[in-house]
Image: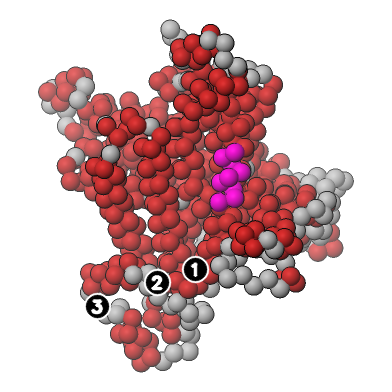
Amino acid sequence: MNRQSPLRRLFRHRNALLGGAIILTLVVMVACAPWVAPYDPLDADLTRALRPPGGEFLLGTDEQGRDLFSRLVWGGRLSLLAGVSAIGLALVLGTATGALSAYFGGWVDLLVMRVMDIMLAFPSILLAIAITAILGPGLGNAILAVAVVNIPYFARLVRASVLSIKEQEYVQAAEALGADHLRILAGHVLPNALAPLIVQATLGLGWALLDIAGLSFLGLGARPPDPEWGSMLSRAQAYIQVAPWVVTYPGLAIMVAVLGFNLLGDGLRDALDPRLRR
Amino acid sequence: MRNYLAKRLLLTFPTAFGILVLVFVLMRIIPGDPARLMAGERATPEQVAAIREQMGLNDPYWVQFARFVGEMATGDFGESFFSKRPVMEELMARYPATVELTLFAMVIATVAGVLAGVMAAVYRGSILDHGVMALALVGVSMPIFWLGLQLIILFSVKLGWLPAGGRVDPRLGWQGSTGFVIFETLFRGEWTVFWDAFRRLLLPAVALATIPLSVIARVTRSAMLEVLGQDYIRTARAKGLSERVVIFRHTLRNALLPVITVVGLQVGSLLGGAVLTETVFSWPGIGRYIVQSIEARDYPVVQGGIVLIALAFVVVNLIVDLLYTAIDPRIRYS
């Protein structure tokens, strides 16, 4: 039997460490953007447009002569913040939905879960596109759309946990001792659902980054001149022939970040949830 | 068996109905007055009011909803604000392009994914295994529209091997009757057009296939490993069967169930991914049309396109479930 603590297992997981290191580096980099970025990300100068990487500009310049590296660093702020906001929102709303649904049971539960099923019947990016199309383009609406799309995953997880824990003896004991329902839910039931939620949130962050980048690429998310990884790609498409670097680096940044979350998420699952280990 | 089929078929109706409810609600939240949108910028208030009445926007919501369901059920998706033609007609003109693209991507993803997964499992722990798994991880971490752009840079701009977009060279002057360029030209033996269309299909299909391919490879590998540990595999080997027979006839067959499930689930990611891929490759399918219609605020088209894709996904899931019962007799009896 493996009786190490989850934290210890996590630290011995090579992929998780790699993923964690990637995320940590990115977070430090974007947090210190004013010091890391050598130029102003919005400072346009057409005389130095589309300079190739190397020399004065580490990764070259874009079509308006803005330093690509600086834009990537500042863009990372926006992209990561957007991903975290979307998943944070989905986590809160999904947990509330799942917990209340399981708690009330009966036709409320049936109705809520059917709605979740129907949301899952849409390809996620398509539903997100539909929601942003309706709310109107903009990073805030894109975040909201990606959050809504992710609610069912959290709701299902929490609901299943609550249902399985509700009948356990210690929960019934707490109830017999006179604890009110909200207290039981928050104090006894939810902490037990924590491990799968953390895993889902980490892996979900990767998906959220991809979906938000996709929405921005389609012109439904962040708007120019704001640097955001997806919208940077959208603008750069026109320069694919003459300046392939402007199309390459923003996508590379997205990939590295998503890879980091995927590695960390897989590792967390192995460490936190031994039942899911293969 | 018949009971199971009936139950499964009946279950698709609430889902389809739910999709309609969701789309109906979403389309009513749109800020702004649809009648004003349809009338255009310069319409007088009287004209807008007339259109409101004509569109039935003054009726109670439940009447509007009942009408909406009736229209959707009969394939009446309304009229495009932009082209003034029936939405259904516009969508039908574009869906063959999407079907060919997603179908081809699915074939690539399934064949390559299963093969990669089998190899990784058979040579477990080898460099090959690690390589396949690393690539699969990178594959699910990439924005596919970005991969599409990279493929264009490499194969069209740098190497000049493949065209960067479009479905068939307009200079060939091809006029098909079905819209399925690949199938139709193949069937009729029109090789010049077929070859051109095939070369154009290659890059978008590969880009679109990447995520499902990676997922299928991972699932195939773990399913194979599970079966390889079973007693009957040891028996098969002990009998002296060749390794090829053991792997493909005994192991792969039993490992196929989870693989089929995941192939079905990936159709969703394909249909969603098609929106992005079609945009990158100027592919004249439904996905790109929806994006263009969002930009043009052509809501009937957006609504119809989304309903169509969601329903396609539901139908595919149904087919997968039925396939599942055909392959695994155990399910019929549970």
Residue type pointed to by label 3: Asp
Tell me the SS state at disc 3: loop
Closest to the camera, between mark 2 and mark 3, is 2
Q: Which mark is residue B77?
A: 2
Q: Residue at x 48, y 89 (%)?
A: B42
Chain on which label 3 sits: B
Q: CA distance from mark 1 to mark 2?
A: 11 Å
Q: Is mark 1 in CB contact (under 8 Å) with mark 2?
A: no
Mark 3 lies on residue: B59
Residue type pointed to by label 1: Met
Q: Nearer the viewer, residue B4 or A138?
A: B4
Q: Residues within 10 Å of mark 3 (few under 14, many from 20)?
A: few
Position above or below: A214 against A271: below
Chain on which label 2 sits: B
Position of residue A271 in the picture relative to residue A227 (left or right): left
User: Residue B210: within the magenta?
Assistant: no
Tell me the SS state at disc 1: helix
Q: CA distance from mark 1 to mark 3?
A: 30 Å
Q: Residue at x 56, y 52 (%)?
A: B102
Position of residue B113 in the picture relative to residue A145 (left or right): right
Q: Residue at x 41, y 41 (%)?
A: B323
Chain on which label 1 sits: B
Position of residue B184 in the picture relative to residue A54 (left or right): left
Q: Residue at x 43, y 23 (%)?
A: A276
- List x then y, in percent, for residue B99: 54, 57
Q: How is the image coloured?
A: secondary structure
What's the magenta region? B103-111
Q: Quadrant of residue A28?
A: top right
Residue type pointed to by label 2: Phe
Mark 1 lies on residue: B92
Sequence-earlier tag: 1 or 3: 3
User: Residue B110: within the magenta?
Assistant: yes
